[in-house]
C-alpha cells in the first residue's frame, strides 16, 4: 500500500518547462504516475510533451482534477507558488527546492496545515511508493515494493540507502524525504504518524543526520508501547562542530546535536541504529525480525 | 549569520527597542571620541558566543583604563576570532537582569518565545519558560501573559515583557532573523533596556536583504582562499584536516561517505558538495581546488544522483580526466539517474566506476597505504 501518493494521483507540475519539470513529465509517466497539467510562469508555451500548460493552478486543477503537485520554482518564488497550489486544492504538495528562507517555510507549513494539505519539503526529492506512484525526482530503480517505511532528511542518502535495502530484498511501502531544512512542511514526527497508520508498513527505517531535533521525535516514537520496530542511520560522525554541512539544519551547535548523542538517544529508545551505511540493511532486518513479537 | 552586537542593537533601536547609547571604537584612539559617562562598558564585537565568560566585556572607570582595556581586547581572540571593533557604552546600574528571546524551532514549525527571570551569562543553566508561537500571526499576548504570570509577580513588568516579545517577533519577521536574543534584558526604574543583542539572520533570505548579502560576501573574504572560491561558485565546502579529497553530491551522502572514510582509518580532507552546481565548470573547480592542495593524497568522487543526472556527470568526468595535469589518483563511484549511460561513458574513457561504495573506499584505502 502507499502513503500520500497512489495510482489515482493526478499531478500538477509547477515549473514544467524547466529541466526538472521536463524530466519529471517523462519520469513520472514512466513510473505510471500521471502528470495531468503544468504551469510555466513567464513562458508562452501550450504544452510540454503533450501535458497542457495553464496560466493558473486553479484552472489546471479545475480542468484536470489535479490533486497532487510538484513545485519546481526557485526559492524567491516558492512561497507564492506553494500558496497557489494549496488554494487550488491540491492535497499533497512536494517542494524540492533548497535555499528557502526559514520564514517562508514557516508560512508554507502553516498554510498547508490550515487547509488540511500535506506539504513535503523544502529541500527534498519527494515521496515514492514503490510500484505504485512517485511525486519527486528520485532514481526509480533504487526502490522495490516491500514492508519498510522510510523517512530521510537527505535525498542522496535515501537513494543509496534504498538501493542497498532493495538489493538485500528489503522493499519499501513508502519513502518520504522530509528534507534537510530546520522547518519542514512534514517533520519526522508527522511522517512517522503517517507510516504508523499505514497497515502495510511493518517496520520503519529513519535516515538522520547531525543537528536539529527530528531524531528526538524518532526516539519518542520508538519508545511508545505501540511503536512499529524502527531502524536508523545517523550520518555526520566525522563532521567538525560549528560548521554547517550543506543542509541548513546540519550543524553541531551543542552536544545534543552530535551524531554520537543522537545515536545514544535512539538506542536508548530501542531503535536499531546502524554503525554506518554498510550496516544499514542488517539494522533494518533486525527491526523486521521484531515485527509481531 | 550572527550580527555583531552593535549592528544588532542598531536594528533593535530602529524597531523601538531601548538600547544604551553606545559608540563604536574601531581603534584604540577612538576612545578619545567617547563623550558618554564613566564608568563605561567596553565590549569586544565578535560573532562567537560566550564572550562575557571569556573576558570580552570590561568595566572601565577612566579614559586611561578604557585605553588599556581597548588595547587588551583588540589583542585578544574569542574562539579564534579577533574583534573587528569594540563597543563603548555607559555602565548602567540596574535592578534585575532578565532573559528574553525569539527562536525558530522545527519542532514547533515556527517561532517560540523563551523567557527567564534570571538573565546574565549563565543562561545555559536556566530552564527558560517557553511559549510556542508557531507562525508569527499565531502570537497571542494573553497566552504569553498567562505563562509569564507563573514566573513573574510584577504585573507591570509582565506587560512590558509581553510588549517587548511582540516587538522582537516583529524584528524576526521583518528582518528574517532566526534568533533574536536579549541577554541580559535589564530592568531600570521598572523599564526594559537591551544590554546585549544576539541576532542571527537567515542567510537564505539574502535575496531580499541587501545587508545579509553584503555581510555574507564580506565574511567569505575571511574564509581560506580555496573555500571562498568554492562558495563563490555554489560548491558547499568545509575544509577539514584529512588527506582524502572528496567530491560529492548531496549533503547526507557527503557526510555518510566522510564517515565511511573515517571508519576505514583515513581522514576526509573536506566536505565538498557539488549538487548545487553540478556543471562542467563546477566539477572542474572542485578538482582544481583539491589538486592544488598538497595535503590531499587521493580523490574520491562519490555521487548518487537524483536531480543530478549521472550520465552528464560521467561525460564531464571523462573530459576532466583527459585534460587533467595532476598525478593524484582519483577513484570513482557514481550511481543514480542515468547510470547505465554513465557506466558506458566511463568504460569508453578507460575509467573504472565502482558499483559499490565499499569497493571505492577500499580502493582509496589501498592507494593510501602505498603513498
Image (tube, helix red, strand yellow):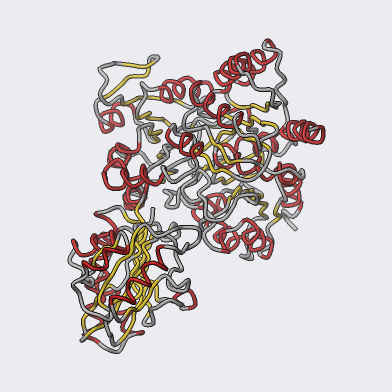
Residue at x 32%, y 45% (from the top left corner): B205
Above or below A39: residue B100: below
Residue B351 as seen in the image, left or right of residue B102:
right
The percent coordinates of residue A133 (x first, y second) are 52, 32
Between A199 and A3, the one nearer to me in the picture: A3
Between B244 and B264, the one nearer to me in the picture: B244
Q: Quadrant of residue B355?
A: top right
The percent coordinates of residue A173 (x first, y second) are 61, 40
Above or below B40: residue A93: above
Between B172 and A144, the one nearer to me in the picture: B172
Residue at x 26%, y 44% (from the top left corner): B210
Do we see residue B115 in this rendering? yes
The percent coordinates of residue B278 (x first, y second) are 50, 26
Residue occupying the far top of the picture = B348
Above or below A217: residue A155: above
Residue at x 60%, y 58% (from the top left corner): A258
Residue B119 as seen in the image, left or right of residue A42:
right
Residue B162 as seen in the image, left or right of residue B369:
left
Do we see residue A29 in this rendering? no
Amino acid at each position: 500500500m502507499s502513503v500520500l501518493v497512489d495510482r489515482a494521483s493526478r499531478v500538477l507540475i509547477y515549473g514544467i518547462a524547466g529541466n526538472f519539470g521536463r524530466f519529471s513529465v517523462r519520469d513520472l509517466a514512466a513510473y505510471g504516475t500521471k502528470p495531468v497539467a503544468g504551469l510555466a510562469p513567464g513562458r508562452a508555451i501550450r504544452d510540454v510533451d503533450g501535458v497542457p500548460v495553464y496560466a493558473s493552478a486553479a484552472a489546471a486543477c479545475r480542468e484536470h482534477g489535479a490533486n497532487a503537485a510538484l513545485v519546481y520554482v526557485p526559492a524567491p518564488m516558492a512561497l507564492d507558488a506553494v500558496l497557489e497550489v494549496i488554494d487550488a486544492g491540491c492535497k499533497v504538495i512536494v517542494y524540492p527546492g533548497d535555499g528557502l528562507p526559514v520564514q517562508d517555510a514557516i508560512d508554507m507549513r502553516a498554510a498547508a496545515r490550515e487547509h488540511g494539505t500535506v506539504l513535503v519539503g523544502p529541500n527534498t526529492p519527494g515521496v515514492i511508493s514503490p510500484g505504485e506512484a512517485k511525486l519527486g525526482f528520485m532514481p526509480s530503480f533504487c526502490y522495490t515494493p516491500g514492508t519498510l517505511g522510510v523517512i530521510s532528511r537527505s535525498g542522496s542518502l535515501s537513494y543509496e540507502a534504498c538501493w542497498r535495502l532493495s538489493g538485500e530484498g528489503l522493499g519499501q511501502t513508502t519513502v518520504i524525504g522530509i528534507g534537510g531544512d530546520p522547518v519542514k512542511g512534514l517533520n519526522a514526527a508527522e511522517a512517522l504518524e503517517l507510516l504508523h497508520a499505514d497497515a502495510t508498513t511493518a517496520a520503519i527505517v529513519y535516515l538522520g543526520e547531525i543537528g536539529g531535533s527530528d531524531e528526538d521525535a524518532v526516539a519518542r516514537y520508538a519508545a511508545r508501547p505501540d511503536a512499529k520496530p524502527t531502524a536508523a542511520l545517523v550520518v555526520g560522525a566525522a563532521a567538525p562542530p560549528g560548521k554547517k554541512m550543506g543542509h541548513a539544519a546540519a550543524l553541531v551547535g551543542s552536544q545534543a546535536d552530535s551524531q554520537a548523542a543522537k545515536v545514544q538517544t535512539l538506542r536508548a529508545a530501542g531503535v536499531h541504529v546502524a554503525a554506518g551505511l554498510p550496516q544499514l540493511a542488517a539494522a533494518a532486518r533486525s527491526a523486521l525480525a521484531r515485527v509481531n513479537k | 549569520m550572527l550580527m555583531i552586537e552593535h549592528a544588532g542593537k542598531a536594528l533593535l533601536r530602529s524597531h523601538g527597542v531601548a538600547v544604551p547609547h553606545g559608540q563604536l571604537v574601531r581603534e584604540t584612539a577612538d576612545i578619545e571620541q567617547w563623550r558618554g559617562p564613566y564608568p563605561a562598558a567596553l565590549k569586544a564585537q565578535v560573532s562567537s558566543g560566550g564572550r562575557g565568560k571569556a573576558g570580552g566585556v570590561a568595566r572601565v572607570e577612566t579614559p586611561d583604563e578604557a585605553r588599556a582595556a581597548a588595547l587588551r581586547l583588540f589583542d585578544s581572540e574569542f574562539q579564534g576570532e579577533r574583534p573587528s571593533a569594540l563597543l563603548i557604552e555607559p555602565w548602567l546600574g540596574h535592578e534585575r537582569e532578565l532573559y528574553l528571546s525569539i527562536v525558530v524551532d522545527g519542532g514547533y514549525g515556527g517561532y517560540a518565545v523563551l523567557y527567564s527571570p534570571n538573565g546574565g551569562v549563565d543562561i545555559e543553566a536556566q530552564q527558560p519558560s517557553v511559549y510556542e508561537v508557531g507562525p508569527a500571526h499565531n502570537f497571542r499576548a494573553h497566552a504569553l501573559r498567562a505563562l509569564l504570570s507563573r514566573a513573574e509577580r510584577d504585573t507591570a513588568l509582565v506587560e512590558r515583557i509581553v510588549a517587548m516579545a511582540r516587538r522582537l517577533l516583529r524584528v524576526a519577521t521583518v528582518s528574517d532573523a532566526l534568533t533574536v536574543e536579549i541577554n541580559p534584558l535589564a530592568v531600570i526604574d521598572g523599564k526594559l533596556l537591551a544590554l546585549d543583542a544576539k541576532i542571527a539572520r537567515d542567510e537564505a533570505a539574502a535575496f531580499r536583504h541587501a545587508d545579509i548579502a553584503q555581510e555574507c560576501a564580506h565574511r567569505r573574504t575571511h574564509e581560506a582562499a580555496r573555500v571562498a572560491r568554492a562558495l563563490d561558485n555554489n560548491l558547499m565546502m568545509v575544509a577539514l584536516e584529512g588527506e582524502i579529497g572528496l567530491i560529492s553530491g548531496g549533503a547526507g551522502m557527503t557526510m555518510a561517505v566522510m564517515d565511511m572514510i573515517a571508519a576505514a582509518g583515513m581522514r576526509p580532507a573536506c566536505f565538498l558538495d557539488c549538487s548545487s552546481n553540478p556543471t562542467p565548470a563546477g566539477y572542474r573547480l572542485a578538482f582544481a581546488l583539491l589538486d592544488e592542495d598538497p595535503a590531499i593524497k587521493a580523490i574520491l568522487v562519490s555521487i548518487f544522483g537524483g536531480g543530478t543526472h549521472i550520465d552528464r556527470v560521467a561525460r564531464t568526468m571523462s573530459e576532466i580526466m583527459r585534460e587533467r595535469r595532476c598525478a593524484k589518483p582519483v577513484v570513482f563511484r557514481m550511481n543514480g539517474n542515468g547510470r547505465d549511460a554513465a557506466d558506458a561513458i566511463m568504460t569508453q574513457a578507460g575509467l573504472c566506476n565502482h558499483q559499490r561504495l565499499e569497493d571505492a573506499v577500499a580502493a582509496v584505502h589501498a592507494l593510501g597505504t602505498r603513498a
